[in-house]
């Protein structure tokens, strides 16, 4: 059997930096069938153990091979409410694919690409996903329409619960809508996944700020249970001199303006001011999304990271795509001061060179500043992509306990407040889409156990 996976087509790097169209084009039928045929159909599939939501991977791949596409879709939906999303943005190389037996002597099965193929096929052929049990009279409110909230809603709705999602923004999807760029996750895909949940009976109310428009106590009085899936939307900054200057942004603001408000379009109401050179500070997937988005605006975009390239936490595929697109990587470098002109506009940074030390208990090498390495770097825009923390406006005047780090305290997904549950980034801090989905699925199970 072939040890090499089938590689799908991608946009040419010189063309894609001029647009926001999806970089990866996905499998065609022949490619999907060829890749599916590589699966060994293991009796004890290790790949399933690596999937946070427990998709029966060999089963849906076998259905692809036998051209039973409705069955393949149904198998995925038994475990995942957002297959078209997961097939695109999940770090499969660290999860299901890392467990694949084929990967021991060759390339692991392209599980993510096959999941995307099934989901896209289902959307194109308008497959039904409305199987649900009879209404049971129980009502659940969900705060936040990100991946955790949407997953929890899907699980509950299929089980006969009446579900209402409250979203603070004017569009549903949470980080899927405002945070991940169009070239990685088209918004039409997110919208179709949301519409599928609405077909199940899920009601989504936008422009509602829980804790202000409606209090958590009012939700507790009206609903049998409440799930907090409000994510982690507060950006972190370095606390260095000059961070209050004009043209210093958080990655959240840049990505929200581009993804949710169309700032890359000429007619945008909130355009991003073009400049010659911009630096994005950070090394995660959000940093990669921000720097690649700026490149598409015609900006000479650099990524600055204080550790080496080997320590970059971003997905290797995103790093590879960024390099192909001409992103400059300034690693082992860290800003210590932002330089401004008399009008408080950014004109550059003072940075220092860094070097790696010994490996710590967490498996990461320490990093420290090199002596006498301070030097200036000219630029006109700086974007901080240093992680995020939860905003607990929804918990105002509630009895939900928080940790010292501002994360919701849970037992499983149960909080300290009666019939209030929480999961995703609001509990763990910023993490991946699939881990947020895992929490939403777990919360739905615990809600159903308690309400039954």
Image (cartoon, rainbow, N blue to C red):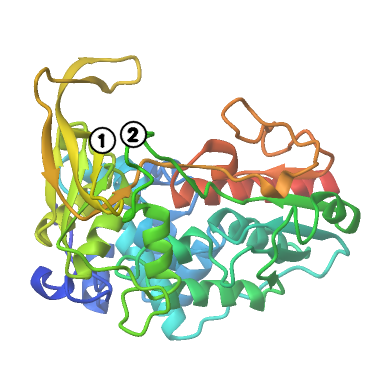
Q: Quadrant of the N terminus?
A: bottom left
User: Where residue 415 appears, x then y in whole percent?
Assistant: 74, 36
Circles 1 and 2, Cβ within 8 Å, touching? The answer is: yes
Residue 110 visible:
no
Q: Give the residue at x 66% y 70%.
A: 206
Q: Is residue 321 above or below residue 397?
A: below
Q: Is residue 446 left or right of residue 96?
A: right
Q: Quadrant of residue 282?
A: top left
Identify the element where label 1 is drawn: strand
Q: Which residue occupies the foreground of this view, 173 or 68?
A: 173
Q: Quadrant of residue 114?
A: bottom left
Q: Give the residue at x 51% y 77%.
A: 192
User: Where residue 77 appears, x then y in whole percent?
Assistant: 54, 64
User: Where residue 344 appears, x then y in whole percent?
Assistant: 31, 51
Q: Residues within 10 Å of mark 2 (few under 14, many from 20)?
A: few
Q: Give the residue at x 86% y 64%.
A: 136
Question: Which residue in the protein does label 2 denote?
Answer: 240
- Sequence-wise, the earlier of marks 1 and 2 is 2
User: Where residue 225 appears, x then y in whole percent?
Assistant: 81, 51
Q: Which residue occupies the foreground of this view, 320 or 349?
A: 349
Question: Which residue in the protein does label 1 denote?
Answer: 337
Residue that protrudes farthest toward the front in the picture: 342
Identify the element where label 2 is drawn: loop
């Amino acid at each position: 059997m072939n040890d090499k996976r089938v590689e799908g087509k991608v946009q040419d790097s010189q063309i894609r930096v001029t647009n926001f169209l999806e970089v990866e084009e996905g499998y065609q039928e022949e490619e999907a069938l060829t890749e599916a045929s590589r699966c060994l159909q293991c009796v004890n599939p290790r790949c399933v153990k690596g999937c946070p939501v427990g998709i029966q991977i060999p089963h849906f791949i076998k259905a692809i091979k036998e051209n039973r596409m409705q069955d393949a879709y149904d198998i995925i939906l038994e475990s995942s409410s957002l297959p078209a999303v997961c097939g695109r943005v999940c770090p499969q190389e660290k999860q299901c694919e890392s467990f694949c037996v084929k990967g021991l002597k060759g390339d692991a099965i392209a599980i993510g690409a096959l999941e995307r193929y099934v989901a896209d096929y289902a959307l194109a052929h308008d497959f039904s996903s409305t199987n649900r049990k009879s209404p049971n009279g129980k009502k659940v409110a969900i705060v936040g329409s990100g991946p955790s909230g949407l997953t929890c809603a899907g699980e509950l709705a299929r089980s006969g619960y009446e579900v209402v999602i409250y979203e603070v923004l004017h569009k549903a999807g949470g980080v899927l809508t405002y945070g991940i760029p169009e070239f990685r996750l088209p918004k039409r895909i997110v919208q179709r996944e949301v519409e599928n949940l609405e077909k199940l009976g899920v009601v989504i109310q936008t422009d509602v700020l829980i804790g202000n428009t409606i209090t958590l106590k009012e939700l507790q009085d009206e609903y049998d249970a409440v799930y907090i899936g409000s994510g982690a939307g507060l950006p972190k900054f370095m606390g260095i001199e000059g961070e209050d200057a004009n043209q210093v942004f958080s990655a959240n603001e840049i990505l929200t303006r581009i993804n949710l408000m169309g700032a890359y379009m000429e007619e945008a109401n909130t355009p991003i001011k073009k400049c010659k050179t911009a630096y994005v500070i950070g090394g995660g997937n959000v940093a990669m999304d921000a720097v690649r988005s700026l490149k598409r605006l015609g900006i000479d975009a650099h990524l600055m990271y204080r550790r080496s390239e080997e320590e970059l936490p971003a997905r290797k595929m995103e790093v590879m795509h960024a390099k192909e697109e001409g992103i400059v990587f300034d690693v082992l470098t860290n800003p210590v001061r932002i330089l401004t002109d008399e009008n408080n506009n950014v004109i550059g940074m003072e940075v220092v060179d860094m070097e790696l030390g010994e490996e710590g208990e967490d498996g990461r090498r320490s990093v420290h500043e090199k002596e006498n390495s301070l030097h200036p770097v000219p630029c006109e825009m700086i974007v901080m992509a240093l992680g995020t923390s939860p905003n607990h406006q929804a918990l105002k005047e509630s009895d939900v306990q928080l940790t010292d780090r501002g994360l919701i305290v849970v037992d499983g997904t149960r909080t300290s407040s009666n019939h209030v549950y929480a999961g995703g980034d609001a509990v763990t801090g910023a993490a991946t889409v699939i881990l947020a989905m895992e929490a939403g699925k777990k919360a739905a199970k615990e809600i159903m156990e308690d309400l039954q």
